[in-house]
Image (spheres, grey):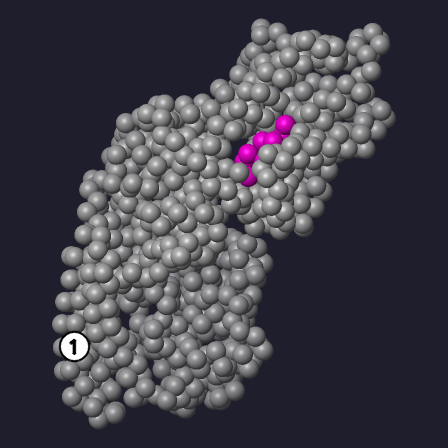
Amino acid sequence: MIGGPRMLPLDLPQIFFNSIITGSIFMLAAIGLSLSYSLSRFPNFTHAEYITLGGYLAYLLSEQLGIPLYIAFALSFLGSGLLSLASYTVVFKPLQDRGSPMIYLMVASIGLGLVVRHIIQQVWGASPLTIRVVWPRWTLGSITVTGLYIYLIAVTIVTAITLHMLLTRTIIGKCIRASSDNVELAFSSGINVSSISRFVWFIGGGLAGLSGFFMVAIANAIPLLGWRLLIPAFAVTILGGVGNFYGALIASYVIGVAENFSVIGLTALNLPTDLKMMVSFFVIVLVLLVKPEGIFTTFGGGSRA
Amino acid sequence: MHPEILGKRNHLAVALAALLICVVVAAIVAGVAGYYIGHSGGYNTGYSEGYNRGRSEGLAAGAERAYREGYTAGYNIGYTYGLSNGTLNVAKALYMGLKDRIMREIVQVSAPNLPSKIKVGCLMALTGELGPMGVEIAKGAQLAVALVNRLGGVAGRPVELILEDTGTDPSKALTACKKLVEVDGVQVIVGPMASGEVMAIGSYVNERKVVLISPSATSPYITLNFPDDYVFRVVGSDTAQAKALVKLALDAGCKKIATLVLDNPYGVGIEDVVSSIIGDKLVVKVRYDPKKMDFRTELTQIKGAGVDGVIYVGYYEDGRIMFRQALELGLDNIKWFAAEGVYGDPMLVVPESAEFMNRAVVGTRPLPPLVSFYDEFLEEYETAFGVKPAAPYIEYCFDATLMLLEAIAKAGVYDGAAIKQKLMEVSSSFLGASGYKAFDKVGDQLMQIYSAWKVVKEAGVYKLIDIGVITP
């Protein structure tokens, strides 16, 4: 039998690289959740299904229809974005206009999510589906990378820069930040908050779809794909501060690193690595207890008043 | 080390002993007294020579051909001619087939003390995760009972099967089991299917002296928790499979080994046995959640530990992702040894997973029955249900039910303790639809042969092939 705790030699560069991959997925999954939360003021559980739909669209287009991956990539973004836009326009906006409290909206989002998930399950079945693409692989020192991970990291960097430019350099970005800071004030200054909200919901849903796309390319498509990413996505949102884009950016990688490094501790203690999922819950509880507004408020950006 | 593990070292010896008894009986009945010497000699020499040669030259040197020769010689001469043919000949000498066995051992016996109706309890997962499979497996018990009733019943008494649903839930299994025992008064139960369910009701059936045979529970914990008791199973324990995996790894020259297993009784059960056998050679143990689709850091840890062998236990869904990520991280330069959970064509659907298996994985799986009365079972099954058996373990459930009925007929009383005593005797000569079913002293299968498999690529197509046989 193995004795007490035992530390193994660490392959730190590879574990950091793994953390960046995990963090990039979290970032794509969480940005939309954080931004839509800040504008519409409720936690949207249907967000999980935007992720799932993006993943299944990737499977449908590239595996079933044989469309090249980069087109499937764009259509995953579009499909999930449209689902997000539709759910806001058809379900959440009318409820908000009727003055429904946050709890109603939250429950409605859970219900809508179940409907979407079960439709997906009816169409594609509950068994895991995979995309059969073989990616090239390179070894850089002790790190092994594949084309897919470079693709993912590139997409994340482009997304981060684009969103940064959008939020700081454009009128629409200023309107998003203004609405996020104070909806009523923004509205009375003449900003069309509904249009801004629709735009943000579309972009956020599309990014969630991309995280699903990459999850399916990395692993496989299952109906619970998005649901399993939702807890880390909420952890990122809360740690980064609701609506705080830069906070969410940093928080994604913080949780990615924490999750991957927890595996080291867990294996050293002979504990099952299932527990790495606890990291996200732990972060949520700790931040809510200590600093409920998120720990990155000092970074500015679109944090709420 | 657990005493029962040491005990199983003697499997071959016990198997031979059991065989000798069978053969002597056969000789008397069939008048072939000379059979024993030839068969026993052929078995010993052929099997051990072939097996040892295969073992020493085969996997260690990586020479498949040598292993194949060892496999062919040892397996064919030893196993087939020795045990299987021996058993088959014994069975055939004694009986004309399953129906003949039922007539002579169950129907045409005199047992004045049996009640006017024989009750058999049956616990199956008819709902829940295993529901779709449980509905099919229950048909095995239904068929056995219908067949015995058609031929005349147990010593002329009709048999009644009382089927209860466990809902794939250990606590519901216990409730259903108590209902069978307290309300219906059954002394024998077929089922339940899952190891967790068997473990939940084991101590209860021991206390109430009710005989239980599971058709499909494989966890080693069943043996560890309930040795020498009323719990039996007609499928091999994973203790044996873990030993087979260790044998593969050590024969391949591995000095530092990692285990990477599902965090459930199947995975952790095998990890425990491996750990108790190889001790310090096991340098890292990882238990993972099959639902999490990101195993890269677990794999990085194994890579960092500098092991030369990985013993892996997984299912299809997580196994494909695991192998794919292992290939990405370059873990194909380590030797992998996988249990039967990842044996199957679904693993080969993902090209990276198939390529990884082709490069690095050798596995084990229980060898399907070579010699049995399966054809007779199949004919009865198709007549009764109009379709072919649609799930694994149906024939195991069929055999378990027949063994219980035969033990009841031999005991002559409907009492768990008496039935249990006769069950050991029945099993030593029982050749059923799922093969030779002899129990060892703790109620596990005496003989479970494992085959070693690997993935080859022929003309661009990956496929699974058997490369040898392992007797743990």
Where is residue B157 drawn, in percent x and y? 49, 86
Where the C terminus of chain A falls, by quadrant? top right
Using the image as rendered, state which of residue B223 and residue A200 is in the foreground: A200
How many numbered marks have been drawn onto this rendered protein structure? 1
Name the residue located 32 percent from the left edge and 86 percent from the top edge: B92
Q: Residue at x 56, y 50 (%)?
A: A127
Tell me which chain the residue with mark 1 is part of.
Answer: B
* Amino acid type at mark 1: Gly
Q: Quadrant of the N terminus of chain A?
A: top left
In this view of the protein, can residue A53 be seen by the observer? Answer: yes
Residue A6 found in image quarter = top left
Q: Position of residue A160 (x, y in %)?
A: 58, 18
Q: Is residue A41 visible?
A: no
Determine the image quadrant of residue B42. bottom left
Residue receiving disc 1? B42
Residues in magenta?
A207-216
Taking the spot 24% from the left edge, 68% from the top edge, the residue there is B72
Q: Is B156 above or below relative to B73?
A: below
In the rendered view, tell whether residue A289 sits above or below residue B129.
above
Report if residue B95 lies within the magenta region.
no
Q: Residues within 10 Å of mark 1 (few under 14, many from 20)?
A: some
User: Where does the image place residue B183, in percent across and percent down from the top left?
Assistant: 54, 67
